[in-house]
Image: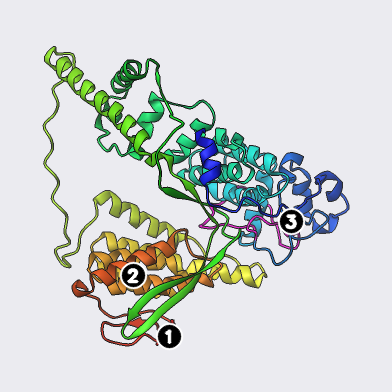
Amino acid sequence: MGLFDRFKKLVVGNSSETLPTQPPVDIKKHSQPMQQHGITTQVIHNIPTEVAELMWFFDGPMKNLDAETEEPSGISFRLPVKKASAPTRMGYWPSYHKMSPTERYSYLNWLTNVDQPIDIGYVFVFFYGLERMIATPKHDAAVKMIHRLKEHHNESGSFSSYSDEALAYAALLYHDPTPLQYIRGTNTSMLILSKAAFDHRLTADEIMSSSRGFGWDNTRYIKNEHELFEHNLLFCLQNLYKQDYYPIPNQLDQVPRTQLHLANLSIATDERVIDLGIIDGYHWTTTMRIPKRIDIPDFSQSKIISRDIQQLLKIAHEKTKEDLAKMRKNGERPKAAAKKPSRKKRINPDTGYPLSTEKAIACARELYKSTIAVHPQQLTGNPDYDEEMRIVDHVLPHYRLGDLHYKLGEWKEAETEWISILDLMGALAAEKLAIMYHKQHRYKDEMEILSAGMKVSQRSKVYPIPDKFADRLIAASEFYVKHSTEDESETFHSSSGHKNSPGGEAEEVEHSWDQ
């Protein structure tokens, strides 16, 4: 049985989802009578049919979404659009609804040629819709479009990763390995799955680029002596397998599972109850929505494959080491430089907290300056959008200033800034504070700040819950339980009045519990 056959049999996921029917879209036919929508109709009229047929609409003749559907790429002709000279940079978790009128124009104009370079946020908005389209009869066209986006927008590691997982999801849903041929990222499990489905081999270059995924951490020669290492690895392959590649075996041992996460948080979200345990005599729980996740076998963790690849890399490493020693002896290479002594940790003498590098501090300072130099967003007349922009305009200066204080070793000041925006920024501000609290051994504070941030983000359209945040909270809770005797938590207050203290009770307005 081949590896992809095992993938189809072992995968845990819903491969029998309802496939909504969707009629073909003739965008030029529909756009003609819609002059009342002005500039939106004019721009959409120029979008190629192969792109338009993969778009989602909340209203108009091309409507294919219900108003209740939370689809970030969904277009409404009721939202204002204003011409723009150049695209602006998008923030986290972008959507067509949250865009400004000029950003909507830039997005629609980009859709007339999705190959042209643009900020990756705009690409993500279209990609969200393609993920949803995978579960429709247009899945083949969606897969090809994802491949096209990957070919022309490969500068973002995040997009590369999410698009690879969407392709694996499509392969799973239809038991068809074809989408796997477009996988291009650095995820070792995805790489093996893709290669096993087609040419059943790993090249020397693929082994080297994915070496860490196979548990090989000594990559010094791979980075600094790439050609020599590749030459020796090819020699090993020829010697051991009589060919210049590693043949992926069909028969493998049991492997652990890994999870795929779709980027579009509106697709098949579920509610998950997180048990935080007994704290101060109360049983704490919280509920959050999580994105669609699919478990698949992680073939990169196969003992057989890992053993084979590590053996190849070890032999190539030793051979490269010997070759370099001979070359230096013969004067063909300069002698290896003595190891530099490790740099002493920089400490702020006034606070005792760590100092970042001068480069990191300068970067944080410039980010803060550029943030406060931006004028507040002009009112558009759309109450929801104007309120969201008001929140962004308020929190970003505090977020950047907190980061600058943190890098300067001024942790108390950083805490003040991040706490002040916790009730608006939620999980993003909480994550910054949690990192700092953990380093201060404030383990209960770490757990509770993450819980408080999650509650804010659960109801926030501007700063929703990030991917894997629930796992982060669970890990912090488990760590606190195991290290409660070492805890050095202090009191913290958010602007809405949420507080915690080592010996106090949690306020009911912020948490739900049963005694």
Say whether marks 1 and 3 touch (CB < 8 Å).
no
Q: Residue at x 14, y 46 (%)?
A: 343
Q: Which mark is residue 57?
A: 3
Across and down, in percent, residue 276 comes to 38, 74
Amino acid identity at mark 2: Ser
Q: Please provide percent x and percent y for residue 273.
A: 48, 72
283 displayed left or right of 87: left
Instruction: Decide: is 282 above or below 262.
Output: below
Q: Residue at x 15, y 19 (%)?
A: 325
Identity, as a three-letter code, of the amino acid under mark 3: Phe
Residue drawn where x is 36% and y is 73% of the image: 449
Corner quadrant of residue 514: bottom left
User: Which residue in the protein does label 1 denote?
Assistant: 514
Q: Is residue 84 visible?
A: no
Q: Earlier in the sequence, mark 1 or mark 3?
A: 3
Circle 1 packing at 10 Å, graded few (<14), some (14-19), many (20+), is few
The foreground one among 377 and 243 is 243
Cα gap from disc 3 to disc 2, whole angstroms: 42 Å
Q: Main secondary structure of the magenta part?
A: loop
Q: Is residue 85 magenta?
A: yes
Point out the stretch of residues depicted in magenta.
71-96
Residue 137 point in image, percent of width and height: 73, 46
Q: Is residue 91 left or right of residue 44?
A: left
Q: Nearer the viewer, residue 2 or 119?
A: 2
223 and 374: which is toward the camera: 223
